[in-house]
Amino acid sequence: MEVIGLTETKQGYARKAYIAIVTHDELCAVMNKATYGDRDRLPDLKTGDTFNLAQGYNFRAEITEATRKMTEAYEKFAKVAPIAAEFAGIVAAKADAT
């Protein structure tokens, strides 16, 4: 993205805004459509079209959810790990005895 100008918007109150050149590939990356097959799924924009970048793909939510699931899985594993180790020891001892 290249900023080529500055302005303000009047959406409720004055906000800083940018006039910028953004490539189609950059929009694809923001919308998580950067893989080869997904690039054509993002529509081509025309002059005057509105594209809300704030509605882009929420990577933070995905990472947070994955971390939560990983933590839950670890907690479940930690509960059964001692039993699994004991069981493995019993199986190994039985194998050695035969």
Image (cartoon, rainbow, N blue to C red):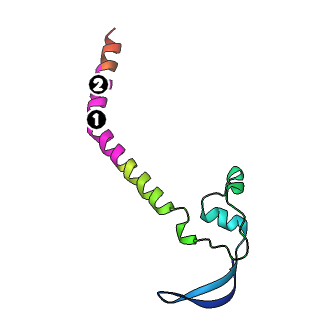
Of the numbered discs 2 and 1, the one sitting upstream in the chain is 1
At label 1, the amino acid type is Val
Query: Is residue 88 part of the magenta span, yes or no?
Result: yes
Residue mark closest to the camera, 2 vs 1: 1
Total numbered labels: 2
**Label ID, residue 87:** 2
Would residue 6 be found to the left or right of residue 47 on screen?
Answer: left
Check disc 2 and report its element: helix, strand or loop.
Answer: helix
- Boundaries of the magenta span: 72-90
Q: Look at the numbered discs 2 and 1 and tell me whether their residues touch, using CB distance below 8 Å.
A: no
- Please give the name of the residue rendered at 42% of the width and 58% of the height, measured from the top-left corner: 64
Report the quarter where the C terminus lies: top left
Instruction: Locate residue 16, reporting x and y percent.
Output: 55, 88
Query: Could you say which disc has been placed on residue 41 in the image?
Result: none
Q: Is residue 98 above or below residue 62?
A: above
Amino acid of disc 2: Phe
Query: Residue 15's x, y, as percent?
Result: 52, 88
Residue 27 appears left or right of 65: right
Q: Magenta stretch mostly in which secondary structure?
A: helix
Residue under label 1: 80
